[in-house]
Amino acid sequence: MTDFMGELCVLSGNAHQSLASKICEYLKIPLGQAEVFKFPNDNTFVRIKENVRERDVFIVQPMSVPVNDNLMELLIMIDAAKRASAGRVTAVIPYYGYARTDKKDQPRVPITARLVADLLTAAGANRILTVDLHAGQIQGFFNIPVDELTALPILVDYFSQMPSENLSVVAIDIGISKKARDVAERLKVPLAIIEKRRQGNDSNAQSLNVIGDVKGRDVLTFDDEIDTGGSILSAVDALKVAGAGDIYCCVTHPVFSGSSLEKMVDSPIREFVATDTLPIDVGQCDSKVTILSVAPLLGEAIHRIHGGLSVGALFEYHG
Amino acid sequence: MTDFMGELCVLSGNAHQSLASKICEYLKIPLGQAEVFKFPNDNTFVRIKENVRERDVFIVQPMSVPVNDNLMELLIMIDAAKRASAGRVTAVIPYYGYARTDKKDQPRVPITARLVADLLTAAGANRILTVDLHAGQIQGFFNIPVDELTALPILVDYFSQMPSENLSVVAIDIGISKKARDVAERLKVPLAIIEKRRQGNDSNAQSLNVIGDVKGRDVLTFDDEIDTGGSILSAVDALKVAGAGDIYCCVTHPVFSGSSLEKMVDSPIREFVATDTLPIDVGQCDSKVTILSVAPLLGEAIHRIHGGLSVGALFEYHG
Amino acid sequence: MTDFMGELCVLSGNAHQSLASKICEYLKIPLGQAEVFKFPNDNTFVRIKENVRERDVFIVQPMSVPVNDNLMELLIMIDAAKRASAGRVTAVIPYYGYARTDKKDQPRVPITARLVADLLTAAGANRILTVDLHAGQIQGFFNIPVDELTALPILVDYFSQMPSENLSVVAIDIGISKKARDVAERLKVPLAIIEKRRQGNDSNAQSLNVIGDVKGRDVLTFDDEIDTGGSILSAVDALKVAGAGDIYCCVTHPVFSGSSLEKMVDSPIREFVATDTLPIDVGQCDSKVTILSVAPLLGEAIHRIHGGLSVGALFEYHG
Amino acid sequence: MTDFMGELCVLSGNAHQSLASKICEYLKIPLGQAEVFKFPNDNTFVRIKENVRERDVFIVQPMSVPVNDNLMELLIMIDAAKRASAGRVTAVIPYYGYARTDKKDQPRVPITARLVADLLTAAGANRILTVDLHAGQIQGFFNIPVDELTALPILVDYFSQMPSENLSVVAIDIGISKKARDVAERLKVPLAIIEKRRQGNDSNAQSLNVIGDVKGRDVLTFDDEIDTGGSILSAVDALKVAGAGDIYCCVTHPVFSGSSLEKMVDSPIREFVATDTLPIDVGQCDSKVTILSVAPLLGEAIHRIHGGLSVGALFEYHG
Amino acid sequence: MTDFMGELCVLSGNAHQSLASKICEYLKIPLGQAEVFKFPNDNTFVRIKENVRERDVFIVQPMSVPVNDNLMELLIMIDAAKRASAGRVTAVIPYYGYARTDKKDQPRVPITARLVADLLTAAGANRILTVDLHAGQIQGFFNIPVDELTALPILVDYFSQMPSENLSVVAIDIGISKKARDVAERLKVPLAIIEKRRQGNDSNAQSLNVIGDVKGRDVLTFDDEIDTGGSILSAVDALKVAGAGDIYCCVTHPVFSGSSLEKMVDSPIREFVATDTLPIDVGQCDSKVTILSVAPLLGEAIHRIHGGLSVGALFEYHG
Amino acid sequence: MTDFMGELCVLSGNAHQSLASKICEYLKIPLGQAEVFKFPNDNTFVRIKENVRERDVFIVQPMSVPVNDNLMELLIMIDAAKRASAGRVTAVIPYYGYARTDKKDQPRVPITARLVADLLTAAGANRILTVDLHAGQIQGFFNIPVDELTALPILVDYFSQMPSENLSVVAIDIGISKKARDVAERLKVPLAIIEKRRQGNDSNAQSLNVIGDVKGRDVLTFDDEIDTGGSILSAVDALKVAGAGDIYCCVTHPVFSGSSLEKMVDSPIREFVATDTLPIDVGQCDSKVTILSVAPLLGEAIHRIHGGLSVGALFEYHG
């Protein structure tokens, strides 16, 4: 194995400093000093407060809400590090936003996930480290190396303690069925899939079909991210109608826009499990919500990237 | 609407000259003159035999077998057209190869679908026109405009003549379930999905689960491409075990490597329907195999791209 | 003169639709149709609602507050237009933000104004049209053509009606002294300059020196943008101490962050004049505030760029 | 001298594994593990089977027959190494194909040798190591560093054992006369040149003129590559007519398309000498054919490139 | 055929305004207005004095002495035209300098001919039009279209009036033998070649061997450029020793550094013929020196490039 | 801190070898061996005479007169170093020429300072080290890291020995007023500014206004570069008219075109102080002219860049 020459340096934008701190704890190094703030004219400004010449710089910043501000913070930090002669700059993006705008599925729309990849590259990022992309193909939007980690083993490990004979995994949308199958396969339980279908000519009316058998079974729903929670709440209704028993939900990225977390807690869902790729304040909801940290996963990956060790090997004994 | 300034010119590599000819018939223009051959040392050579200065050049070449030769032919033709001062060069790739290598799903593998996009761009292509990409995200592998057409309406139109009350669409793999759902939705019939799952510790042993109900129903399987036919033949077996009635198969891209076409014809499949995005010699098999041409679709798209007309509008009244 | 081939199309983001509408009025064309909104997960989305193939697209969007959102909107609109095969995309940015972060004047800071130029180019902009950059060198941050217009003649014309024998122009900061001189020269009146200087060892304590004579004279202060208003209010105090008479203020870009507009109105300033490169709601303040529109200037420039006419000639008879 | 930081790693495509193995023997390191194969659909696939993070990777692959397959293998291996975070990737191309298509000598032809350079760069190669380019200018088709080695000293050393008083070197084509002169100069023997000239109006009819004296002299012909052998066999005839004695042939790159090797052996040529920049199976022909290995040359160059030692110094005491 | 949309505009740097004027005469258009001069601090400055928006701009500038000044003038003019929104910029470089530094033939030297290609591209040139490159491969140093014209037919036509039965063409260096052969073939006369060879261990001592027969024959020497004239004067001596009769010299590019023109005139050469790709003042030497103009050739090529007509066709009936 | 891996190597073009030698003295290393000369045809040629593989190469070359020759030398040296596999190439440009052509202030002019940045990047420079750019924004013309040093502390230190109670700093042009203020602030003395203004309709007639008080005071003028000296001599006249006492002049970059140095010496200026960023031969003028060397500043910066130490820290205790 071959160390990257320069000394390791982890910086954080404002999006998720607590995650960056946990990563530094894992790595047993102090978090690098930087100030990141807005001028009164709403212009984001960055100043890195320690020498980064030739160092191996990792900048931790998920594209959480406010998305554009956090993205611009990240781009500006990369620019500052590049112009300050950093040896290598890795953007650590635990949650890669704009990932659902990854193809032209109607005329004259953007492919923003590619645009974001180009913006990161134009700013000067040399590598990307991320977790559970909405679509694996987003790796190919980059020509710089991308290390995509997966939090699936963390989620699966958590649920593997549960008795599985009466459990089914449910993909709450046909688009997530492949990853849900991976969860089901790891847990050695059956898979069912919920298919949304337009009703008649009204483009908003949809029916939900549960494909596969859930009657009398406990179910674990899986999705890669939860946003308004609308899909999952409809799915819960459809599953209850189809006769499902206890309902557990897991998700990698808890976006939780608006009051969706509260709605989730008020629903018949028994437990909701997510990771901390995004900052999340569970507030009063903590009895029903479990957050599992990706900090050790990211910390170990940074350690391996810096040290020239295989990152793929991180996943060899899982699942 | 605004015409592209230069005169239209359609050229063809050696991969699929009959399709290029049909496109030119649709456009009512002669196929452009070019010679494309290999020297004895196996080097591909190209000479465009008519003036293309400032013209709007379309080069028709699917990435069919032999894939690397056909790709290199295309790249070299693009280079020749660019250096001959073509006004604009559009690579018309009815079948985009290497599309299944579109992400790093294990350590140290390439993302060849992105590499191919970069090769086309490096050679000098200004635009891409293609049909039914394996994953829509491949559009985002390009920074030049991509017009992705879909042959789904052609296939759906063909099957929409069949009585549908006893028909189900089956995704023969969980990865194709979303597009199969689109077919099912257009035909207004139910969807079932076949899930492959590893058996025990032997990584080669797989079981096939049919998720959803097919008992006593006729089924139409859908996949975007058929290669060795292994998946579809296993799916047919599983569907028969599950009690399915008549089995129809449709696919956009008939790759048919080796003797797979013959195997298909010898199977219980009642009818196999594909398009001509790839050259295919149905030989003796024509009683069971139906080929629908994409030439009018591509011809109309070229007409619209050249003329500054909306290509999206091509699909507005379908499905 | 030579028309750009494709038909003219003006689009607007959400930052300043009223300016875009005025520009279209000048050009006697309807504003192009596009929807630009945020999904619940705070992701900006864009859909251009009319065919833009081969057209000459101008997207109007100043980088006003919220700056990062407006910039991302612009980048995403450019990406959508490029992928929709626009013939040419011009970003019309009446106010170019981040312009004050245009050099490294301390260690490890970014050059965000260059970064923004690279982001615009990476997104696919073919040209830039802008007004009164903070520093003319920002033109050189681009390798695509930049047309920088100036609103100085509009402001100077307004004040040229005033009696000038007792008037002086004052640069409110040494950094703006060159442009203030241009204003003074056009108005044929003397120039004075306010120099801020640190006091002792306290880096925040500053004294203001008025260099040049203002005693008993009416003064017109000039700055390219007004933000918190702090500088101008201090300048007004210093000018009053120095014995200045009536104080008029003019500025190209009225950023007016926070409650600065109100503070301005409450100050001894007699009249405040700005342009509408940024959206501004003068509300109750309109007796003291005059807004001059740059829409005819931008409209005429777009007309000339589209038609291949000289833009430089726009300014030949001014000043 | 300065070592490249990362550990050395030599990989091989399928084109010429025996050469790669010999190079590794010279370097006393094991050949790196990689699988390179075609899927049934004719898509080349690559998986590097050991960690290459930050390592100094050399990929050995001549562009031998099948040329396009071997080139694509190389490009895909480079992509895989780049995405696997290799510290540096050097494409070791002992025989650079497409080298004869290095200029536009008729209208509307490609410059494929430049295209190939761009493809290698687009794939992510950081450096090139090659042997005896058809034209030295091909170095300039790259903007990454190219180390071009020459096998001339190996060939000259072999023939320098022969008595030289009655020997002449013959350039078998006017295009190779400069390099043949170098051989003649190193051997301190006279040079003659064969000039092909069109006969009358028939573009295929050619006469061969031997410029310079060969009557009664043994001759050593030189060319950089031998392909169909047509040129050399015609040259041999012309030399015999001109009264030449024994004929020896040497060439760097033995392409030997079709049955050309057999034809060569059946001709009056007394001995044929080439290097192993291309895989060659001399079969029954070995009494007349001598193959000299470039493995030590390439191995030493790799050692020097990795170790920061001068490669130019490799050639200082030769010739 | 398809006209380039914008109006034609020919500009000239200071290197060779008389050639630019002759080209404009051929094209029956006035030379475009531009001022190109040096500030006292030796900085070259350019101002284009007429509107070039969307126009098809050709900038005529050979890389004659002073080479670096003329190259920088050209680069700066290209930059000015690009930033002034020219529709297309073609650098017309009748003599491409630095062409002999086209490969690394010793360690740690540049490939300046490629560097110059990159500088032209970086400055914003869209196309190149040039005459008789030292090596055709220099075309491949560019990725923008290059039209390389040849003045050989002009030179050959001139000499084709001479009686040819006693004439031989002589390549004055082995490096030029291929082009000299083309001249010989067009004139239907024999070819001889002069080979320089190092003498003993002194690297400066050279002997010249005339390969082929010149005894009693008139000879026409050919080279692509003449610089100090040293090579040609030595060649003349060697030819005289070998018994040659009258000696005529022709060359495309008359660089004539220092007093070489005078030396040429004082030598036994009977007539010296060159083109005006470079400015040349024949002064008192005109009885022995003939200059043939390439202006009609360049003018016709510009006419064809602008009009979308084949440039290759220009040469179809020659030779 | 982290050393750049490769060994340090300082090379010099012909522009200012004495500065390069002084830098090497400071660094206690020998100056790297390279030959840089012109062929008779005026083509600049470079050969680096020692191995630079993987080394950390710094090339010292101000853009002094002859500007274009010195720039091309630098570009060609960078190309040679890049192709010779240098680990990193830093262009050390003590005086960055073309810096005054940094924006389009009239129609159809170039932005040569950006063009030069692109040429340096295209040639292969990895970093820039420079002194006192005419405008700090020129840093942003680069996307590679730029370290801009300032010689102001050197100049200020020199003058800080003078009694300051009767001293004023004068900006000799409004464009330099900001930097002159920095000098004044460091010396804790007042600032005055000279404003040139057009007189009537004659564009050449100018009047000079001294803004601020200089009557009876000694003055120190400041400019970043002195060229023809016209501005400073006019300024001296205006200052004398305004009643100034002794006049001292300081400047970073002594361009001194033509006979301007002599004129300066013949003027009432008491002492002229500059640095050696440009080669300057003070000849007989040395009683009035003081040259302060930037060699220790550049040497220390190179030491820090090579060693991964903060360059910003160089300036922390100054001024």
Image (spheres, coloured by chain):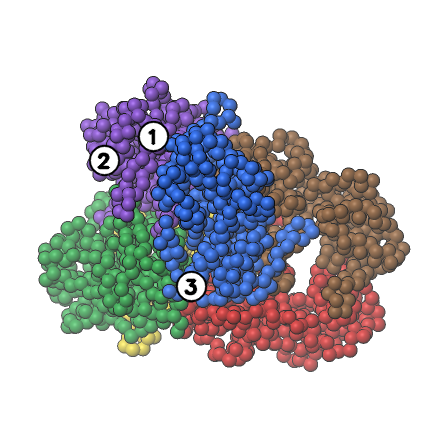
Chain colours: A brown, B red, C blue, D yellow, E green, F purple
Up/down of F142 relative to D42, above or below: above
Residue F215: x and y, percent?
30, 25
Residue C79: x and y, percent?
55, 56
Q: Nearer the viewer, mark 1 or mark 2?
A: 1
Q: CA distance from mark 2 to mark 3?
A: 48 Å
Q: Chain of mark 3?
A: C
Q: Residue at x 75, y 78 (%)?
A: B162
Q: Which residue is mark 3?
A: C307
Whether callout 2 and callout 3 share a subunit is answered no
Q: Return the residue nearer the eye: C277 or C111.
A: C277
Which quarter of the picture shows residue A317? top right
Q: Chain of mark 1?
A: F
Q: CA distance from mark 1 to mark 2?
A: 20 Å
> Quick one: label 3, few (<14), some, or many (20+) residues within 10 Å?
some
Q: Which residue is mark 1?
A: F170
Question: Identity of the amino acid at label 2?
Answer: Ser
Q: Secondary structure at mark 3?
A: helix
Question: Identity of the amino acid at label 3?
Answer: Gly
> Quick one: label 2, few (<14), some, or many (20+) residues within 10 Å?
some
